[in-house]
Structure formats: structure tokens, C-alpha cells
């Protein structure tokens, strides 16, 4: 990938520090929004609790006045009728009046004004209850009891109304404070929400830029990969052509060397053999007696040289492959392999020769030769199979052994040979398979297309 273009694309990204800062800021905003919401909820609950308590305070003040009026009415009914049943409300309110007064004392906030008002209220209530109690004990009200009772009741009512007004004013003040708090909190929450939305918009833009950048990088990578794939295919084709050229050149050089060895060296060895024979026939027995042993050794050396020359020629370019065909050449190769080692060789060859292109026939022979050499060097096998079969329009060669298989160093030692085999098969538009497991031996199978027989060959067949 172009480093300049990649650096330009990366320049469009937010710096890592900026992304971390935005993330931290977002977390802070979320925590502040959550904290302000909890704070507002707690304040609202506290305001509601205050309103409930204010209602209870007012209810206690009203209950105090109602209890005194009910007690006064009960005493008045008793005095008028003389029936003590009318005193039941009085007795009940007399028992609860002190409790209600104690609740009022707990409700009032500490302060000099409230303490003075509460002391005056307690004194008036005590006087009122004592007046009613005296009336009940005498069974008749005093001459000025009614006027005095009305006066104390009015003073108690006025004191309770004053306390009620103070409690109401306190409740209104608390309500106004709660309202102001809710308004302020509303603006705070609104501001935090707007900041969070702005941050989300910024992050969304950054994510969109990142997505576009990733798409651009992915497009560049695809383009670069396609370019690299094309370059690899081109280089592979070049290397394959080079390998094919080197293989063909090597086979051509082997053929040239085999031809020169056959023509030049063969002629020299034959001439030397003939000259030696002439010397042996032309010299007198008395002269020959002293060097007969050396002439015999020289003849043996020449025979061994001729045999060595023949083996070298056969390895370079087996003449039987062109003269007798592939099947006979493979049979000769198998016989040489069986005669030179301890492995038991099983040959499975067709009785008649097969019609195959010269390059394909040479490839089959070379692969069989290389495979048997690998078996001899690395497999440590006890039995080997060399089979050649006609399978439809293909010729199949199989070499299998029961040796150590492809493991460790033996696999690496045969790696180049296997690559060469595979390439030879590819040159012939064939197929190459190898199966091997440690301790289970190795099986090599190659398939190459057969050559369709000519009409003349069909007529002769």
C-alpha cells in the first residue's frame, strides 16, 4: 500500500488522545446527568415529605381547636340536661388534648416566637380545661362562666390561627424553595442533556469518519491484494516457465551428453578394444607370455569402462525408452532396483506398451526413477510396489512402499525431489498426488493423458 496515501488517510482520524478525552468527557456528562437526576428526585421527595408534615401540623392545630370545642359542647349539654352521658366526648377529648398539645410542641420549629406562642397556648388550654372541669364538678356554670369560656376559646382560636398562619407561611416558603430548586435543576439537566447530545453528535461524526476511512482502507487493501495476486501469478508463471525451460534444457543436455558418450567415447572404447585384440592376436607367444596377464586385466578394464559408459548413457537418456517403449524401460528399471537392494519389489505393468507423448513418457520414467531412489535412500522399506495402469484416457503410475513415511528429516531431504516430480507432471498437464504417514509408508500417484492412437496404429492393432 502507498505509505503516503495511507498516512493521509490516517491523518483524517481523530488522534488517540482526542478520542480518549471525548470518551472521558462523555462518561463525566453521563455521571453528572445521573447525579443531577438523583439529586432532583431526592429534593422532590423531600419537598413532598415537607408538604405532608405541614399538612399534619395544620391538622394537629385544627384537631386541638375541635377537641376543645367538642369538650365545651359536651359540658354545656351535661349542664343543661343533667345527663352524664353527654360527658363522654368531654372525657375523651380531655384525655387526648394533652397528647395533641405535645404533638403541636413537636411540630413547631425551635425559636423564641414559637416557644412563647406555645407557652401561651398551653396556659390557655390548661385554663380552659380547668374551667370546664370546675363546671362539671359543681354541676352548674358560674355567673360569668359563659363569657369567660367564650373569651378563652376565642384566645385559643386566635393563638391556633396564628400558629397555623406561621406553619402555612413556612410551608409556602418551603414550597417556593422546592420550586426554585426544581427550576434550577431543570436547567442543569437540560444543559447536561444538550452537552451529551452535542458530544454524541461529535462521536457519531467521528465514527462515520472512521467507517469511511476503514472502507477506503479496505478498498485499497483489495486493490493492493489484487495487484499482489496478479504479480504473484505473473511471477509464478515466469518461474514455472523457467523451471520448464531448465528441465527441458537439462534433458536436452543429457541427451547431447549421452549422444557424445555413445558416439565419441563409445568409438574410442571400441577402437581400444579392437587394438588390444590385435595385439593379443599379433604378438608371438614368447613375447605375449610376459604380458598376457596385464593384457587380460586391460581387457577387463575396457569391458568395465564400456559397461560404465552404457549405464551413464542409460541414466542420461535411456535408449530403451525410445527403442522398446515405456513399459519395457520401467521393467528394466525395476529389475535393476530389485537386484541392487534388500527391498522386495512387486511390478504391476501392462503386457503391451502404451501410446504416450515422448515428453510424458520421459516424465513418467524420471518420476519412477526418482521415487525408487528416494525409497532406497530414505524409506527403509521392506516391500515396494511399482504399478502402471491405463485408466480411461489417462495413464496412472503408482509407487508405494511400507517404509518410515514422510517425517522429520526424510521429508525435507525429499522435498526438492517431490517438487521436481510435481513440476514434471504439471508440464504434461497431469495430476500428482502423494499420501504419507509416519510409520505407514508413502504412496505416490501420477496421472498423465494418453495420446490417441492414429488410424494406422488402429489398423495394425
Image (spheres, helix red, strand yellow):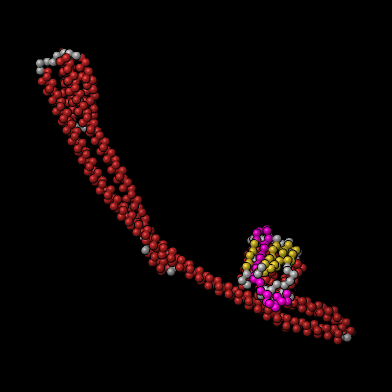
- Disc tally is 0
Is 427 in front, or is 402?
Answer: 427
Image height check: is 223 above or below 109? below
Query: Can the viewer see residue 362 in this picture?
Result: no
Image coords of residue 213 (percent x, y): 39, 63
Q: Which residue lies furthest to the right in this view?
A: 286
Image height check: is 112 above or below 224? above
**Quadrant of image for the C terminus:** bottom right
Residue drawn 21% across the image and 26% down it: 63
Q: Give the magenta-colored segment's residue range.
A: 436-461
Residue drawn 45% across the image and 68% down it: 223
Image coords of residue 452 (percent x, y): 66, 74
Q: In which quarter of the image is residue 94?
A: top left
Image height check: is 41 above or below 316? above
Q: In which quarter of the image is residue 180?
A: top left
| Residue 159 among those drawn in magenta | no
In the rendered view, does 281 fall on the left or right side of 386?
Answer: right
Image coords of residue 458 (percent x, y): 70, 75
Query: Can the viewer see residue 84 in this picture?
Result: yes
**Quadrant of image for the N terminus:** bottom left
| Residue 454 among those drawn in magenta | yes
Residue drawn 17% across the image and 13% down it: 82
Is 12 in front, or is 94?
Answer: 94
Image height check: is 133 above or below 277? above
Q: Quadrant of residue 402?
A: bottom right
Amino acid at each position: 500500500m502507498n505509505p503516503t496515501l495511507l498516512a493521509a488517510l490516517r491523518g483524517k482520524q481523530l488522534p488517540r488522545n482526542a478520542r480518549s478525552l471525548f470518551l472521558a468527557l462523555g462518561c463525566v456528562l453521563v455521571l453528572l446527568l445521573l447525579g443531577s437526576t438523583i439529586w432532583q428526585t431526592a429534593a422532590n421527595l423531600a419537598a413532598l415529605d415537607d408538604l405532608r408534615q405541614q399538612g399534619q401540623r395544620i391538622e394537629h392545630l385544627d384537631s386541638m381547636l375541635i377537641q376543645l370545642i367538642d369538650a365545651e359542647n359536651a359540658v354545656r349539654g351535661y349542664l343543661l340536661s343533667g345527663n352524664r352521658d353527654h360527658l363522654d366526648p368531654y372525657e375523651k377529648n380531655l384525655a387526648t388534648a394533652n397528647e395533641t398539645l405535645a404533638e403541636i410542641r413537636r411540630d413547631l420549629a425551635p425559636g423564641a416566637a414559637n416557644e412563647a406562642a406555645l407557652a401561651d397556648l398551653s396556659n390557655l388550654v390548661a385554663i380552659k380545661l380547668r374551667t370546664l372541669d370546675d363546671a362539671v364538678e359543681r354541676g352548674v356554670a358560674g355567673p360569668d362562666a359563659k363569657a369567660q369560656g367564650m373569651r378563652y376559646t376565642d384566645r385559643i382560636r386566635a393563638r391556633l390561627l396564628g400558629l397555623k398562619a406561621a406553619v402555612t407561611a413556612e410551608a409556602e416558603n418551603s414550597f417556593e424553595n422546592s420550586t426554585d430548586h426544581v427550576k434550577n435543576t431543570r436547567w442543569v439537566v437540560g444543559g447536561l442533556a444538550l452537552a451529551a447530545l452535542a458530544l454524541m453528535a461529535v462521536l457519531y461524526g467521528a465514527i462515520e469518519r472512521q467507517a469511511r476511512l476503514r472502507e477506503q482502507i479496505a478498498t485499497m487493501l483489495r486493490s493492493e491484494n489484487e495487484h499482489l495476486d496478479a504479480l504473484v501469478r505473473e511471477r509464478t508463471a515466469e518461474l514455472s516457465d523457467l523451471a520448464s525451460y531448465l528441465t527441458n534444457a537439462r534433458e536436452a543436455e543429457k541427451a547431447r551428453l549421452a549422444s557424445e558418450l555413445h558416439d565419441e567415447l563409445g568409438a574410442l572404447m571400441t577402437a581400444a578394444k579392437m587394438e588390444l585384440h590385435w595385439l593379443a592376436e599379433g604378438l608371438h607367444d614368447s613375447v605375449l607370455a610376459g604380458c598376457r596377464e596385464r593384457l587380460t586385466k586391460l581387457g577387463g578394464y575396457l569391458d568395465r569402462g564400456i559397461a560404465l559408459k552404457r549405464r551413464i548413457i542409460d541414466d542420461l537418456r535411456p535408449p530403451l525408452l525410445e527403442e522398446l517403449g515405456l513399459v519395457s524401460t520401467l521393467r528394466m528399471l525395476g529389475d535393476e532396483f530389485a537386484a541392487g537392494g534388500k527391498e522386495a519389489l512387486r511390478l504391476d505393468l501392462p503386457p503391451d506398451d502404451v501410446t504416450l507423448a515422448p515428453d510424458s513418457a520421459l516424465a513418467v520414467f524420471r518420476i519412477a526413477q526418482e521415487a525408487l531412489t528416494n525409497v532406497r535412500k530414505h524409506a527403509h522399506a521392506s516391500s515396494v510396489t511399482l504399478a502402471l495402469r491405463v485408466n480411461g484416457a489417462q495413464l496412472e503410475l503408482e509407487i508405494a512402499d511400507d517404509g518410515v513415511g514422510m517425517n522429520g528429516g526424510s521429508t525435507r531431504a525429499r522435498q526438492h525431489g517431490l517438487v521436481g516430480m510435481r513440476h514434471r507432471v504439471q508440464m504434461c498437464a497431469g495430476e500428482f498426488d502423494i499420501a504419507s504417514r509416519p510409520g505407514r509408508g508413502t504412496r505416490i500417484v501420477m496421472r498423465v493423458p494418453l495420446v490417441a492412437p492414429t488410424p494406422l496404429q488402429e489398423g495394425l492393432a
